[in-house]
Amino acid sequence: MTGNADRIKTPLPSPAKLVLPDPLPTLDQMRDVMIAEALRRSSGNLSAASSILGISRWGLSKRLKNLQ
């Protein structure tokens, strides 16, 4: 069984450390950025990237197909 319980919890950055552009990106844009960053951090490993994002590997694969 996999899920969010197995993920390593990392604290969210404080607002002072989190830099967001003005105007704010859309949720779709942020989703794409988060997926790209998770894939970068996992060297393209879908299982590791999905774990970073807290979603299933199937869910990540589905989102990647929708990006194309």
Image: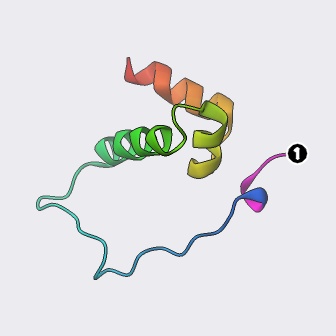
Q: Which of 28 and 1 is in front in this view?
A: 1
Q: Kindly identify the residue that appears in the image at 65 percent across and 47 percent down.
A: 51
**Which corner quadrant holds the N terminus?**
top right
Q: Quadrant of the C terminus?
A: top left
Query: Label 1: how many residues lie within 10 Å, few (<14), some (14-19) or many (20+)?
Result: few
**Residue lying farthest right?**
1
Relative height, residue 23 to residue 49 (above, below): below
Q: Give the range drawn in magenta.
A: 1-5
Left or right: where does residue 26 sit relative to residue 34? left
Tell me where residue 43 appears, x and y as whole percent. Answer: 51, 36
Position of residue 52 relative to residue 5, above or below, is above
Q: Is residue 67 left or right of residue 56?
A: left
Write down the quadrant of residue 10 in the picture.
bottom right
Mark 1 is on which residue type?
Met
Q: In this view, does 47 lie to the left or right of 16?
A: right
Return the x and y of residue 63 as percentages of the image width and height. 50, 29
- What secondary structure is the magenta-colored segment mainly? loop
Query: In percent of the image, x 35 and y 44: which residue is there?
Result: 33
Q: Quadrant of residue 32?
A: top left
Q: What element carries label 1?
A: loop
- Front residue of 8/63: it is 8
Q: Name the residue under label 1.
A: 1
Q: Which residue is drawn at 58% across and 25% down?
A: 61
Residue under the image location 59 percent in, 32 percent down: 45
Residue nearest the observer in this picture, 53 or 43: 43
Residue 58 falls left or right of residue 62 = right
